Amino acid sequence: MNRIRLLPESVANQIAAGEVIERPASVVKELVENALDADARRITVEVQAGGRSLIRVTDDGVGMSRDDALLCLERHATSKIQRAEDLAAITTLGFRGEALPSIASVSRFTLVTRERDAATVEATQVNIAGGKILDVRAASGPPGTTVEVRQLFFNLPARRKFLRRVETERAHIQHYLLLAALAFPEVGFTFIHDGRVVWQLPPLPRAVDAPAQRAALRERLRALYGAELNLLAVDFTGELRPAAMPDPGEAWEEEPLEAPAPARRVSTLRVWGFLGAPGVSRATREDQHLFVNRRPVENRGLNHALLEGYHTALMKGRYPVCCLFLELDPAAVDVNIHPAKREVKFHDERTVRSLVTQAVRRTLLAFHATREKSEVGSQLPEAGNPTPARTDAQTAPAAALSPEPRPLEGLLGPAATPPAPSGESGLRAPEPETAPRNARPGPELPPPLLAPVAAPASGLRHAAAPLPPQGAAGPGPAGPVPLLQVPLRLVGVIGRLYVVLESDRGLVLMDQHAAHERVLFEQMLARLEQGPAPCQRLLLPETVEVSARDAAWLRGLLPVLTRLGVSLREFGERTFLLDGLPPFVRGGDPRQFVLELVDALRAAGSEVNPLRLGEEMVAKTVCRHAVKARDPLQGPELENLLEDLRRCAMPYTCPHGRPTLIEFNYRELEKRFGRSA
Amino acid sequence: MKLTVTKEQFAQGLQAVQNVIGTRSTLPVLSNVLLQAEGEVLRLTATDLDICVACAVTAKVNRPGATTLPAKRLSEIAREAATTDLDLDVDERNVCTLCSGPSRFRINGLPAEEFPPIPVIEDRGVIQLPQGTLKKMIRQTAFAASTEESRYVLNGLYFSFKDHKVTAVATDGRRLALTEEEAEFDGNAEVEFIVPSKAVAELGRLLQEEGQVELRYAENQAQFTLLPGIAGATVLTTKLVEGTYPNYQQVIPRECRERVTLSREEFLHALRRAEIMTSDKNSAVKLNFARNQLVITANSPEVGEAREVLSLNYKGTEFVIAFNPLYLADALEALDTDEVYFELNDELSPGVLKTNGPFLYVIMPMRTN
C-alpha cells in the first residue's frame, strides 16, 4: 500500500505560511516589503485589533496587471528574481515568491491593484478566502496596490490561539514599521491602528549623497523618537577582503560559503548612520537597529562588534543605542538563511565585524577629536560636497594640527587602539599598530599622502578610510559639539565629589573620581601597550581542556597569545598546557583565566586587543589610585584634571562605563525653572 | 569563678591567644576568650572555628569555674591596669567584676557553654621537634605560599614526615620554597598535610627559640603543643587544607649548568635598588652573567633604568635571565647565611637558590623581549 502522497497546494501553502507568517507583524512585514520593492512613495498601514481582524497595506507603487495579479498568488511566483544566480546577489527585500500565497492561504484576502504606468485606469480586484480564489473582477482604484488581510488565521485555530494581546501584536507591528521607516526615509509611512493615526511620516527627499542621507535619517529619527537624541553620525568605509582564504579560526563557521569563491572581487563595506554618544545606552538591545543593505537584521556577530566598539564607553549590561546601516555588495551577504529573512550571513563575517567595530570606535573617538578638527569640520558649509575639505584636512595636517595634538598622539592610540583601517593599508585582518599611527598627524606622513590623490576621484568612499576621526566625525550640521571642546569655567566643588563647571551652554558636572579614573586608566594602558608583554613562567604548568571547537580556534591563536605574554602549548587533541602568564595577571585560577580569555576573544572576534588581558586589572588598580569621592581638591588640581581628561581618547566615561561628565544645558534649566514653555 | 592573676601573666596569656579572634564575627561568643580556672592555673582559649589557640597562666584560684569575656577589652585592661595584681570575680550570670587597685570594671560575659568545644585530637603518634627548628622552617618557606584563594591547596604550608625527616614546602605556582629537618617521631608512619597560611603565621608568632613542639594530627586537624609555654603548654589546633598538594618534586631541577656563589646581602641590596626602576609594565630585572661579573638591570621605558654590577667568581658562558625581583628578594630575606648558591641552566629554565643548609628555592624566570 502506498503511504506517501503529494499534499494539495492549499496545504502546502499553509505549511509555508507556518514558516513565514508567524503573527500579524509578519504579514505587515511581507506586505510592506512588497510595497517598498514596488517603488512606493507612500505606504499606509491600517490595522485593527492588533492585526487580528484587519491589516490593510496601501501603496502607490508600480502595481500589477490583471495577469500578474493572479500569478502573484501562485507559490514561487515573483518578479524579483529570475535565475538561481540572482539568489547570490539579492537587491530586493523579498525574493522567495511565497509571501502572498502564504498569507492568502491563512486569511480572507483581497488584492486591489492598478498598474501605475498602464494606459488603462481599470484596477483588478482578487478575493481569496483560505487560499481559494472566490472571484476576480475589475474595480476602480488609484495606481498602486492595496492588500487587505482580514481574519488572519481564521482557518488555523491553533495559530490563532498563539496570538498575544492586541497591544502586544500592535507593538510588534509598530516595531517593524519603525525599522522600515528608518531604512526608507524617502518613503512616507502612515500607520493607523483602530482608526487612529499613530504615525504620519512624510516622505523625505530622496538622498543623493551621504550627508543628505544622514540628514534624512536624522529627520526620520526625530519624527519617530520625538526629542533630540544625543546621537553621533557615523560614516565609515572599509574594504572587505577579496581573497577567499578561509581563516583558520572561523573556518568552521562558514565552510560552504567560503569555499567556492577563490576570485571574489574587492568590495567595500560602508557603515553609516547614528549611534549614541558615550553615556547614552539602554538596558536592552531594544534601540539597537542594524540594517544590512537596508534590511533590518539580527546578527550576533554584529551585536558583539558594536559592544566591542564601545568597549569601556559602555557599562556592563548596557547596550548601545544605534541605527546603523551596512552597505555592501549584495553578493557578499546571504539573506537566504531564514524564511522571514531576519538573519543574514556575511561571507566575510570577520572583516565585517572588525569594520563595524572600527566604525564605532572611530566615531566615539572622533566625538572627542581635537578642536582643530572640528574647525575643519565646520568649514564644510554645504554638506553636499565633502571632498575638498577632506583633502584639505589631509594634505595640510602638519600645519593645521600640529600645535595641540602632540600630547594627544600618545594618548589617543592606546586606550582606543583603533585598528588599521583595512581600507587602504591592510587587506588582511587588522594590524593594530602601523596604519592609524601613520594616518594621524605627525612629523612624517608617508603612506597617507597617497590617499588624497585617490580621494577626489572616488569621493567619500576612499577618503573615509585613512582619515580616522574626520571621516567618522560626520560634521553634519546637527551633530552635537562635544562637551569637552567647549571652554569650561570652574565654579566649585560640591559634596567634595562633583565639580561644578560652567560652559557657554549651561551647567556641567564632573565626577572627580570617575574623571581621574579615566585619566589614569588611559595612562596606564599607554604604558602597558608598548611592545610585547613579558611572560612570567609558571612553576606548575596547568592543563586546560577546551571543547573541540574551541581547540581548533585556540590553536590558530597561539602565536597571538604568546605575543600577549600567555604561554600556551598544545598538549594533546583538546588539551593545552599553560606555562606562562603576563606578570600583571594575578589572582584567580590560571585555568579559569584561559577559559575566560577564550570566551572573551571569541566574543571580541579576531581583533585581539593585547591590553584586554590586563584591562580588568588596570581598571581595578586605577580605581584604587584615583582620587576618591571625599578627597578635597584645589582649583589648580581640578583644572589640571579637566585638562588631562580633555586629552583622553574616551573622556566621557570612566573605565567601568559610568559617565564622567553630565551636562545641563540652559534649555533644560529654563524648562525646570518654568522660563520656557 | 574567683581568682587573682598578675597583670603580666594575664597580658601574656591574652597576647598569645587573642590574635586568632576575627574582627568581624557573626557569632558573639567568638569575640570572647574562654577562661577556665582550676588548681593554680588559668587557661585561656580563643578560636575562629578554624584555628584554636589555648594557653595557661599561673593564677591564685579562690573559686574554680569557667566563663567567656570579651578578649579585646580584657587585654586592654590588662595592659593599662595600674597595679600588678588583678582580681576577677565572675558571678553566675557571667558578669565579671575586675578590680585592680583603684579601678573596678564590670564586664558582661557569655556562658562558657556557648563557647565552641575545643577540638580533641585522638593520639595517633607524636612528632617532636625543637621549636626553634620549626620556627626557622616556617620563616624560610611560608612567604612563598599563594594568597590566591582560588587555588586553595596552595594557601598553606605543606608538611611531610617521612624517613625521620620533616619537609616543609610552599609555592604560589611561580616560585617554590622548601626546607628539610631531621625529626623524631615514633613509628615509621608517613604523614603529610597542609596547614593553612593563617595558622602558619600564628604558629610562627607563638614559637620560641627554646623548647619543644609536639605535633599531633588527625584526619583533618593538626595540633601543635608548644612546651614549656607560659605556665603549661600553649596549644594551637588547626583545621587542615583539604586536597592534594601538587607534586613539587617534579618541578625541582635535577641538574644545573651554572652554579654561582653570591653574597646574600650584596645580591639582595642590589636587587632592591634595581627594583626601584621597575614598573607595572615591566616588573622584571635582568641578570646578565658575564665573566666574573653579574650585571643586574631594570628598564622601564617611561621611568628610566637601573644598573647594578656585582663581581663574583664566574667562568661559565655569558647569558641573560630575567626574574621578578620581589620573588628573589623574598627568599634572600628569609635566609640568614652569608652566601647563597644560584643554580641556572638557561634563560627559560627555572633557577634554584640554595644554601649550605637544607634549603631550596625554585624560581621561574620571566620571558622578556
Image (spheres, coloured by chain):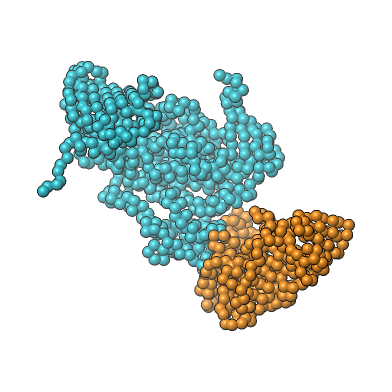
Horizontal and vertical percent for residue A255? Answer: 30, 52
Relative placement, left or right, of A8 versus B187 is left
Horizontal and vertical percent for residue A324? Answer: 41, 36
- Snapshot quadrant of residue A339: top left
Horizontal and vertical percent for residue B132? Answer: 70, 75
On screen, residue A28 above or below B127: above
Residue nearest the observer in this picture, A589 or B39: B39
Q: Can residue A601 be seen in this snapshot?
A: yes
Horizontal and vertical percent for residue B79? Answer: 81, 60
Chain letter for the orange part? B
Residue situated furthest right in the rendering: B102
Residue nearest the observer in this picture, A659 or B3: B3
- Please state, as top left, top right, bottom left or bottom right, where the C terminus of chain A lies in the image: top right
Q: What tint does the image give chain A?
A: cyan
| Residue lying at 29% horizontally and 36% vertically, measured from the top left | A158
Residue nearest the observer in this picture, B363 or A385: B363
| Residue lying at 37% horizontally and 59% vertically, measured from the top left | A548
- Snapshot quadrant of residue A93: top left
